[in-house]
Image: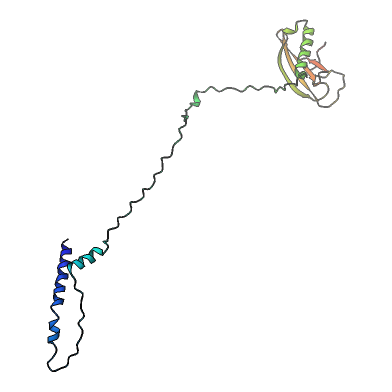
């Protein structure tokens, strides 16, 4: 406001000086000389009202307010899936009791309606031993049964004075027990022939 008043006073002083300076020009013309009239430029009188009008018409410069900064969108926290975590358990291996694997003879399950050849062989030799000992077949027990390949048709128990084919003959070895004794039966694969082999490696008398 003070600055505006100072400007108004300065303009008023300049206007007063311009109005009183017209006589000084006429006196400067020398006597007897024909003076060339120089038109004095006329300045439009500036009145406080005119200046105020001009000032009021000047668009006021307003400070441009900075635009508010756009807030950076914040990402929602990543959801962490909660699962049932399994806590590892430490096992003292020295406290475990080792289990001895028991070897077993692979047993093939026969197709429906087809008898198991090994089971059929066991039943056949069990009945033969019960007949030999004159006991019930229920008193005969299986000790061991395994598939073997005999070196010839004697099934590993040759009869002295008999000739045999020297061909590999697949079959079974079945060990039974009865009345405290064990008995060693040799058979071919088809079950068409079997022999009770004595402790001397010869067929036992029937």
Q: Nearer the viewer, residue 7 or 174?
A: 7
Look at the image and tell me in which quarter the C terminus lies: top right
Q: Position of residue 163 (x, y in %)?
A: 87, 22
Q: Residue at x 14, y 89 (%)?
A: 29
* Placement of 160 over or under 53, stated as above or below: above
Q: Residue furthest bottom?
A: 32
Q: Quadrant of residue 188?
A: top right
Position of the N terminus, as image quadrant, is: bottom left
Question: Nearest the camera: 194 or 25?
Answer: 25
Q: Quadrant of residue 168?
A: top right
Give the percent coordinates (x, y) of residue 106. 70, 23
- What is the basis of the colouring in this image? rainbow
Please provide percent x and percent y for residue 90. Answer: 47, 28
Residue in the foreground of this view, choosing between 120 and 21:
21
Count up the numbered dots.
Answer: 0
Is residue 111 shown left or right of residue 38?
Answer: right
| Vertical comparison of 26 with 13: above or below | below
Vertical relation: 48 (above or below) 164:
below
Residue 89 x/y as whole percent: 47, 28
Residue at (14, 76) in percent of width and height: 17
* Residue at 71% in and 17% down: 144
- Side (left or right) of 176 relative to 100: right
30 lies left or right of 119: left
Q: Quadrant of residue 78?
A: top left
């Amino acid at each position: 406001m003070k600055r505006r008043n100072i400007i108004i006073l300065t303009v008023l002083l300049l206007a007063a000086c311009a109005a009183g300076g017209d006589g000084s020009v006429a006196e400067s013309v020398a006597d007897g000389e024909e003076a060339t009239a120089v038109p004095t430029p006329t300045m439009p009188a500036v009145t406080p009202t005119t200046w105020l009008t001009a000032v009021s018409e000047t668009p006021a410069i307003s400070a441009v307010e900075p635009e508010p900064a756009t807030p950076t969108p914040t990402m929602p926290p990543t959801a962490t899936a909660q699962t049932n975590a399994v806590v590892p358990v430490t096992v003292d291996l020295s406290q475990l009791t080792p289990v001895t694997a028991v070897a077993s003879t692979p047993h093939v399950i026969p197709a429906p309606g087809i008898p198991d050849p090994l089971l059929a062989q066991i039943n056949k030799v069990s009945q033969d031993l019960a007949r030999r000992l004159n006991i019930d077949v229920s008193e005969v027990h299986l000790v061991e049964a395994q598939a073997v390949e005999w070196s010839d048709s004697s099934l590993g128990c040759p009869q002295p004075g008999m000739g045999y084919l020297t061909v590999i003959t697949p079959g079974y070895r079945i060990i039974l027990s009865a009345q405290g004794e064990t008995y060693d039966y040799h058979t071919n694969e088809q079950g068409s022939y079997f022999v009770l082999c004595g402790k001397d490696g010869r067929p036992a008398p029937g």
